[in-house]
């Protein structure tokens, strides 16, 4: 499944920006995800898998790193959409 086809990305543009964020970089030491939904990229070539999902036994895990709580990122419409979509997807709706 292509990332923008995943239910967590429903209703989002192909690319969107979070203008104030804290930069994270790979490698990010987590188990290989079943899918990478979002990636972040910075001007100097750094990148980060900022949205990943795992199916674990009878449940699902979604990791999302939109930025740092110091900035008003959780009021950004795209971030709110991601969180709403993730809740619906993980809840089986």
Image (tube, rainbow, N blue to C red):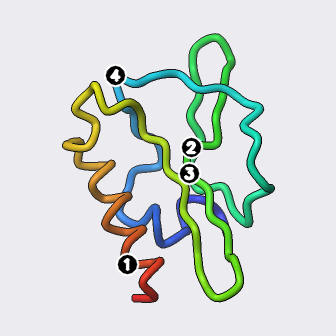
CA–CA distance in space, label 2 to label 3: 4 Å
CA–CA distance in space, label 3 to label 1: 16 Å
Counting other residues with Cα less than 10 Å from the Cα at mark 4, is it few (<14), some (14-19), or many (20 or more)? few
Above/below status of 25 relative to 65: above
Counting other residues with Cα less than 10 Å from the Cα at mark 2, is it few (<14), some (14-19), or many (20 or more)? some
Label of residue 20 in the image: 4
Q: Secondary structure at mark 2?
A: strand
Above/below status of 75 relative to 82: above
CA–CA distance in space, label 1 to label 4: 27 Å
63 or 39: nearer the viewer? 63
Instruction: Mark 2 and mark 3 in contact? Answer it, CB < 8 Å.
Output: yes
| Residue at 45% from the left image edge and 78% from the top image edge | 89
Counting other residues with Cα less than 10 Å from the Cα at mark 3, is it few (<14), some (14-19), or many (20 or more)? many
Q: Earlier in the sequence, mark 3 or mark 1?
A: 3
Quarter in which the N terminus is drawn = bottom right
Residue 74 figure quarter: top left
Q: Earlier in the sequence, mark 4 or mark 3?
A: 4
Where is residue 12 drawn, in percent x and y?
38, 55
52 or 78: nearer the viewer? 52
Quarter in which the C terminus is drawn = bottom left
Q: Earlier in the sequence, mark 1 or mark 2?
A: 2
Q: Earlier in the sequence, mark 1 or mark 4?
A: 4
Above/below status of 90 relative to 12: below
Residue under numbered circle 1: 88
| Residue at 68% from the left image edge and 18% from the top image edge | 45
| Residue at 37% from the left image edge and 78% from the top image edge | 88
Residue 10 figure quarter: bottom left
CA–CA distance in space, label 4 to label 2: 15 Å
Q: Secondary structure at mark 4?
A: loop
Label of residue 50 in the image: 2
Residue under numbered circle 3: 51
Q: Earlier in the sequence, mark 4 or mark 2?
A: 4
């Amino acid at each position: 499944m292509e990332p923008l086809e995943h239910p967590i990305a429903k209703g989002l543009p192909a690319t969107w920006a979070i203008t104030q964020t804290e930069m994270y970089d790979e490698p990010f030491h987590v188990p290989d995800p079943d899918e990478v939904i979002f990636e972040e990229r910075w001007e100097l070539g750094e990148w980060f898998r900022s949205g990943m999902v795992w199916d674990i036994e009878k449940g699902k895990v979604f990791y999302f790193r939109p930025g740092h709580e110091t900035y008003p990122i959780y009021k950004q419409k795209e971030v709110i959409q991601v969180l709403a979509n993730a809740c619906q997807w993980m809840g089986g709706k």
